Image (spheres, grey):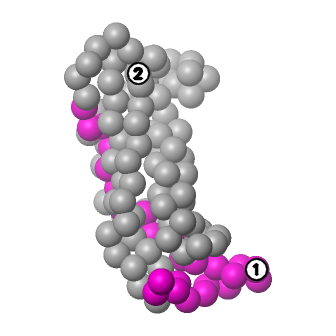
Amino acid sequence: MPADANPYGDIFGGWLMSQMDMAAGLVAARHAKGRAVTIAVDAMQFHRPVVVGDEVSVYARLVRVGRTSMTIEVESWCRDRHGEQLCKVTEARFVFVAIDEARRPRAISAG
């Protein structure tokens, strides 16, 4: 939407990063079977701008699980509103930690 863009019509990188964080958070919470929080974003790359009106899709996959942490690779792709060609616009690795009710790290169950 225009409120999420700069004066040139490009979507703010922070808005796109927040969408990626939400997608990664869903994967992390599902795997951890509970609350998980972002502790790091690594290797964030912006390949091309997203413009107002583009359709954006975000894909996330779990690539590593530690005792309390998970690494999730995330890609964002866009398509022009009236076109069919997809283009990768961003990619990054998000690290999440599973936390308990007291917001302390907790072990992720193996099952």
Left or right, 102 with respect to 65, comes to right
Residue where numbered disc 2 is placed? 54
Residue at the image point whose x is 41% and y is 25% from the top: 55
Q: Is residue 20 above or below residue 36?
A: above
Residue shown at 50% from the left, 71% from the top? 31
Q: Quick check: 20 left or right of 79?
A: right
Q: Give, as a three-letter code, the residue at label 2.
A: Asp
Query: 109 or 102: which is nearer to us?
Result: 109
Q: First in sequence: mark 2 or mark 1? A: 2
Frontmost residue, 29 versus 3? 29
Residue at 37%, 66% (x, y): give it.
Answer: 62
- Location of residue 110 in the rendering, given as x and y in whole percent from the top left corner: 46, 87
Numbered disc 1: secondary structure: loop
Report the magenta residues as a range.
87-111
Placement of the N terminus among the 4 image quadrants:
top right
Instruction: Residue type at mark 1: give it.
Output: Glu
What crowding class fits label 1: few (fewer than 14 Cα within 10 Å), some (14-19), or many (20 or more)? few
**Could you tell me which secondary element the residue under label 2 belongs to?**
loop
- The image quarter containing residue 102 is bottom right
Q: Nearer the viewer, mark 2 or mark 1?
A: 1
Q: Which residue is mark 1?
A: 101
Query: Residue 56 sits in which quadrant?
Result: top left
